[in-house]
Image (cartoon, helix red, strand yellow):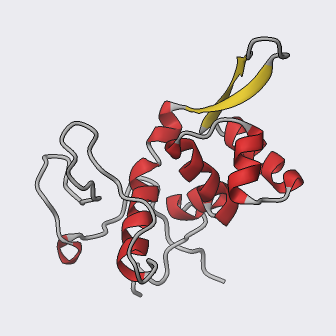
């Protein structure tokens, strides 16, 4: 019996994460938040997402603690909500940057990427790299998957 093939995957962290952020509009909303958008009307204009779907996705991101709602008021206008990223949302940056990096390499326009990620302090290109918790750079071929504390085998049928 190969434990990799007979393991119970019902508690997979990747699957659980995709339940929250595995939909196109959700990732694109997060992209726009990182690019500086914060208002419903901004998201609607930039994304072209149907209003009902946009509303549902924003509500879910707030319920999950990835975004928070703050109130702002422009002079002479009523108070309105704006969406801000939380620390939990910031922890998704490497995942989305990884998608951007892959897309820039394999799916960019023939002229090149539409947006470049640069380090604000020095201007150098930002890329996603894998390292161990001790800071060593790790190649994909050097990663091993081992059973964790919640590992369990699939029950016999």
Q: Is residue 113 above or below residue 78?
A: below
Quarter holding residue 114: bottom left
Q: Is residue 126 left or right of residue 150?
A: left
Q: How many marks?
A: 0
Quadrant placement of the C terminus: bottom right
Q: Residue 60: horizontal and vertical position, in percent?
A: 74, 44
Residue ID at (44%, 43%)? 91
Quarter holding residue 47: bottom right
Residue ID at (31%, 69%)? 145
Q: Is residue 31 left or right of residue 51?
A: left
Residue 23: tell me if it is visible.
no
Quadrant placement of the N terminus: bottom left
Query: Front-most of 31 and 145?
Result: 31
Query: Front-most of 82 and 142?
Result: 82
Q: Residue 18: horizontal and vertical position, in percent?
A: 60, 62
Q: Is residue 51 above or below residue 82?
A: below
Q: Residue 56: horizontal and vertical position, in percent?
A: 82, 49
């Amino acid at each position: 019996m190969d434990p990799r093939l007979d393991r119970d995957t019902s508690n997979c962290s990747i699957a659980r994460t995709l339940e929250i952020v595995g939909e196109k509009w959700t990732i694109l909303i997060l992209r726009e938040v990182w690019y500086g958008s914060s208002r419903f009307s901004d998201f609607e204009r930039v994304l072209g997402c149907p209003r009902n779907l946009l509303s549902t996705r924003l509500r879910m991101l707030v319920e999950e603690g990835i975004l928070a709602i703050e109130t702002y008021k422009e002079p002479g206008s009523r108070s309105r909500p704006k969406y801000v990223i939380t620390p939990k949302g910031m922890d998704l940056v490497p995942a989305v940057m990884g998608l951007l990096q892959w897309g820039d390499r394999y799916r960019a326009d023939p002229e090149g990427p539409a947006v470049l990620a640069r380090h604000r302090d020095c201007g150098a290109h930002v890329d996603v790299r894998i390292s161990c918790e001790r800071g060593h750079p790790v190649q994909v071929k050097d990663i091993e998957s081992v059973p964790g504390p919640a590992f369990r085998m699939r029950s016999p049928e």
